[in-house]
Image: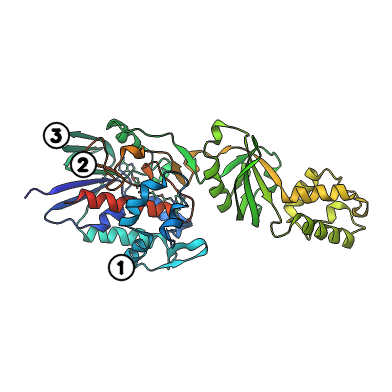
Amino acid sequence: MKKNRIAIIGAGAVGLFAAASVISDDYNQITVFEKNSFTGKKLLITGKGRCNVTNNCDLQEFMSNIPQNSKFLFSAMRKLSTQDTIDFFVSLGVPLKTERGKRMFPESDKAADIRDALYKRAVENGTEFIFDTVKDVKESNCVFTVITKNSVYEFDRVIIATGGASYPRTGSTGDGYRFAKNFGHTVTPLYPSLVPLVCREKYLSRIMGLSLKNVKLSIVDSANGKVLWSDLGEMLFTHFGISGPLVLTASSYVRNINSFPDRFLASIDLKPALSFEELDKRILSDFTKYQNRDFVNALNDLLPSKLIPVVIERSGIPERTKVCVIKKEDRQALVRLLKEFTLQIRSTRPIDEAIITSGGVKLSEIDPSTMQSKLCDGLYFAGEILDIDAYTGGFNLQIAFSTAYTAINSAII
Ligand SMILES: Cc1cc2nc3c(=O)[nH]c(=O)nc-3n(C[C@H](O)[C@H](O)[C@H](O)COP(=O)(O)OP(=O)(O)OC[C@H]3O[C@@H](n4cnc5c(N)ncnc54)[C@H](O)[C@@H]3O)c2cc1C
């Protein structure tokens, strides 16, 4: 019997997981193409080298972490749930642990353990790895021709798993979008997501490096004053704007910002644990304690020292004003400033710096129960190349694994 020859283009999260999930045998032969000289280059840097591999949540919570098109994933998530992923890694000898926000990491804290375990199992399964760049994929009479830099191969089925367009130095340079278009697929506009935000304020360079813990960040649409999103957590000021976990999540809510410059504001509540009245009381008590000091020397108990000059500047109260003469209205304006420290968001950082690419191969052209193209039999797409992405928390890798598992189990016979 003639073997079913399956090519997977890309040995990232999708390619490795797919190849580790099924065995090359008398019926199927799986070949993975990778342009780098080793597998899983992006996987190795995930979770700051620790790999937030999935999230220990149920399906409903999982879906609530996908801002758009989540319905597409129901079938794939039923085939490979977060629990199945956890069990699979345990079976590979990589036990996982749960951290804040149900994020799961390998107990070893090493992304390399995830990559190595997948690669080892894939090789044990009989997968062939070819380290060569795929230049083009063509189909004629149900035979796919994969043209690489160095050779030409024929396959019966092809899974395109080339990733998105972010962090191109890891190999995901967007080649798969071109392959998809050549097969007549639509690629929806690509946006950076989970990406730092660029702000207008010039003084940011003076507070660059300052990290704020336990603040509340809100994204406000200045066109109508609507709060689009808000959450508590950690953020960081950089020379261009803001970054850190809260900001990366916030960026999912302003993905179209580059078409609406200056429309969105980042509003930081520097003291979320205190109500307006409580914070006013707290400042009044500090002002009583330091009544003979200048304003500039009265905020040390309240704010990180790097932030004080900026807050003073924005408060409009001259820094040498004696605290005892600061009027109630000025003090209350200071409270408002600390509860709503706003920044004008100008744009996102470029897609190269985004954790994830939003947009991609149009989902209505893909069968969600198989990941097979509706335009070309035998052609499959999985992972970041698809027009679906999630917030931070291990959800994006789970999407890669579930779509990979669905595609390969549909492609084998
Ligand atoms: C810094 C960073 C940290 C992240 N951390 C996390 C995290 O902790 N948790 C999480 O859930 N998600 C995280 N992500 C997102 C996650 O890495 C992606 O969702 C995931 O890697 C997508 O898998 P993929 O297989 O679709 O693409 P990739 O992993 O990018 O793999 C695509 C592969 O295809 C290869 N390729 C591309 N074109 C060709 C070609 N023409 N020929 C041959 N090979 C080709 C590439 O070299 C690459 O190896 C992070 C992303 C980044 C950038």
Disc 2 residue type (three-letter):
Gly
What is the spatial separation of the Cα atoms under label 3 and label 1, in whole angstroms?
40 Å
Q: CA distance from mark 2 to mark 3?
A: 11 Å
Camera-nearest label, 2 or 1: 2
x, y percent for residue 198: 60, 40
Q: Is residue 244 visible?
A: no
The residue identified by callout 2 is 378
Q: Earlier in the sequence, mark 2 or mark 1?
A: 1
Q: Nearer the viewer, residue 39 or 156?
A: 156
Residue drawn at point x = 20 percent, y = 47 percent? 6
The vertical placement of 53 against 15, above or below, is below
Which residue has dot 3 on it?
141
Of mark 2 and mark 3, the one earlier in the sequence is 3
Front-lying residue, 282 or 13: 282
Residue type at mark 3 is Asn
Quarter of the image where one finds residue 346: top right
Q: Secondary structure at mark 1?
A: helix
Q: Which disc is residue 91 wearing?
A: 1
201 relative position to 309: left or right: left
Please provide percent x and percent y for residue 268: 67, 49
Residue 288 position in % (x across, y down) = 89, 60
